[in-house]
Image (cartoon, rainbow, N blue to C red):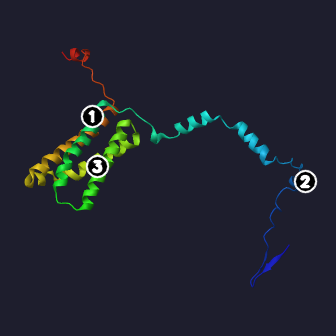
């Protein structure tokens, strides 16, 4: 055994690796079989792989963000109303003295809104979430300025108030089908029991 010396004491060296293992484990190992070649491995993998149609179906099922969900009729009407009101507001927004960059940004925003509304109407779940998030942010940006607009510019106030109302209705229209509520107008048993 090797020892290391120091000025104070002699310490034994750590045991070599594998010295604590059972010596019988290293004896009489069978020789490994000849490893299969790459062609044999490729053939085995191809035999285990499912057919192309099953793989394609698995890929379609693995994409939850691209799924299509039917749009409720009230939601479809709300999306079209928000888009139409954005186009009605366009002349009033262009009437303000704006630079070419601001005009380009306005045109780009209307184009993005058109594409997003089209994607929502086709039933894209991701587009619906983005659309409702943008509606919510727009309400939070416009609503605090409504009293100031009412005082100084009534036309802008009416345009902004209708825009906020349309976007609130769009949020409600998409929230209503998700609510689980039951209204029983024909249930007379509870009404008769209170008499």
Describe the element under mark 1 as helix, strand or loop.
helix
Between tags 2 and 3, which lies in front?
3
Residue at 88% across, 56% down: 23
Q: Please, is residue 83 above or below residue 8 in the view?
A: above
Q: Residue furthest bottom?
A: 7
Residue at 35% across, 39% down: 120
Instruction: Give how far across and how far down residue 189 sits, in percent.
Output: 26, 15
- State how far apart marks 1 and 2 are (Cα): 80 Å
- Position of 43 with respect to 104 (left or right) is right
- State how far apart marks 2 and 3 are (Cα): 78 Å
- Position of 55 with respect to 166 (left or right) is right
User: Which residue corresponds to mark 3?
Assistant: 110
Instruction: Give how far across and how far down residue 82 sits, in percent.
Output: 25, 41
Instruction: Give how far across and how far down residue 146 sits, in percent.
Output: 15, 51
Cβ–Cβ below 8 Å for labels 3 and 1? Answer: no
| Badge number at residue 126 | none
- State how far apart marks 3 and 1 are (Cα): 18 Å
Between tags 1 and 2, which lies in front?
1
Describe the element under mark 3 as helix, strand or loop.
helix
Front one among 180 and 157: 157
Between tags 3 and 1, which lies in front?
3
- Determine crowd level at label 1: few under 14, some 14-19, many 20+ residues with C-alpha closer than 10 A: some
User: Which residue corresponds to mark 1?
Assistant: 77
Q: Residue furthest front?
A: 100
Mark 2 and mark 3 lie on one chain; the one further toward the N terminus is 2
User: Which residue corresponds to mark 2?
Assistant: 27
């Amino acid at each position: 055994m090797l020892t290391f010396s120091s000025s104070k004491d002699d310490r034994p060296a750590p045991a070599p690796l594998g010295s604590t293992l059972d010596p019988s484990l290293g004896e009489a190992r069978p020789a490994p079989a000849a490893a299969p070649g790459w062609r044999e491995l490729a053939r085995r993998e191809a035999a285990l792989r499912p057919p192309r149609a099953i793989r394609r179906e698995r890929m379609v099922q693995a994409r939850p963000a691209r799924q299509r969900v039917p749009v409720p009729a009230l939601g479809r009407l709300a999306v079209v109303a928000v888009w139409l009101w954005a186009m009605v507001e366009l002349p009033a927004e262009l009437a303000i003295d704006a630079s070419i960059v601001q005009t380009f940004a306005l045109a780009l925003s209307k184009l993005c809104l058109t594409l997003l509304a089209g994607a929502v109407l086709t039933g894209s779940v991701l587009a619906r979430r983005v659309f409702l998030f943008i509606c919510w942010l727009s309400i939070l940006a416009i609503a605090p300025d409504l009293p100031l607009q009412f005082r100084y510019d009534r036309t802008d106030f009416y345009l902004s108030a209708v825009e906020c109302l349309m976007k609130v209705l769009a949020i409600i229209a998409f929230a209503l089908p998700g609510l689980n509520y039951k209204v029983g107008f024909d249930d007379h048993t509870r009404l008769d029991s209170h008499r």
